[in-house]
Image (cartoon, rainbow, N blue to C red):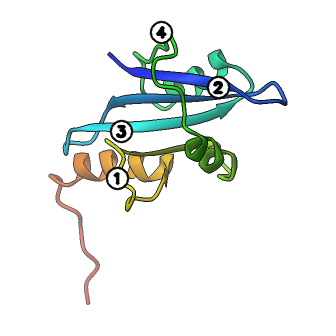
């Protein structure tokens, strides 16, 4: 079950924050922050990334002002970091999380090396 919430911005768009299980083998949880036109679109963005069972029920853990600022300044509008929040850890783009999961799946395969 994911915990999360949202906040509506003055221009009508929303920022959705969700705490989800980490898809990488390391485990734990990640805090995903998504900026979108509406809540449904934000959840669709996450579902399109392979997080199929993502739902937002209630507003128990809305994004903090720092999270809103971070996602608004990111060009993709979709960032994450491990939860619970560690002030020393920076926000990561979604590509970094996808790279971790893909890299661990490929780790067992032999990769041919170029001669030389």
Query: How far, Cα to Cα, is label 1 from label 2?
Result: 22 Å
Q: Which of the 4 image quadrants contains residue 28? A: top left
Other-residue count near label 2 (Cα within 10 Å), few / some / many at <14 / 14–19 / ≥20: some
Sequence order check: which comes first, mark 1 or mark 2? 2
Q: Which residue is mark 2?
A: 7
Indicate which label's residue lies in the foreground, 1 or 3. Answer: 1
Sequence order check: which comes first, mark 4 or mark 1? 4
Q: Does the CB distance between marks 4 and 1 fall below 8 Å? A: no
Sequence order check: which comes first, mark 1 or mark 3? 3
Sequence order check: which comes first, mark 2 or mark 3? 2
Q: Is residue 5 above or below residue 17?
A: above
Q: Which residue is mark 1?
A: 86
Q: Which residue is mark 3?
A: 30
Identify the secondary structure beneath mark 2. strand
Q: Does the CB distance between marks 2 and 4 fall below 8 Å? A: no
Q: Which residue is mark 4?
A: 57
The picture places residue 110, in percent across and down from the top left corner, at: 17, 59
Point 36% across, 29% down: residue: 20
Query: How far, Cα to Cα, is label 2 from label 4?
Result: 14 Å
Sequence order check: which comes first, mark 2 or mark 4? 2
Count how many numbered circles sit on residues in the image. Answer: 4
Query: How far, Cα to Cα, is label 2 from label 3?
Result: 19 Å
Q: Which of the 4 image quadrants contains residue 45? A: top right
Other-residue count near label 4 (Cα within 10 Å), few / some / many at <14 / 14–19 / ≥20: few
């Amino acid at each position: 079950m994911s915990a999360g919430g949202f906040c509506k911005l003055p221009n009508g768009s929303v920022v959705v924050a969700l705490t989800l299980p980490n898809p990488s083998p390391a485990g734990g949880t990640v805090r995903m922050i998504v900026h979108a036109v509406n809540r449904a679109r934000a959840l669709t963005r996450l579902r399109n990334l392979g997080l199929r069972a993502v739902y937002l029920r209630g507003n128990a853990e809305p994004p903090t002002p720092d999270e809103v600022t971070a996602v608004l300044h990111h060009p993709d509008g979709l960032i994450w970091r491990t939860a619970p929040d560690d002030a020393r850890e920076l926000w990561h783009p979604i590509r970094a999380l996808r790279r971790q999961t893909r890299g661990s799946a490929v780790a067992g395969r032999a990769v041919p090396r170029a001669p030389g």
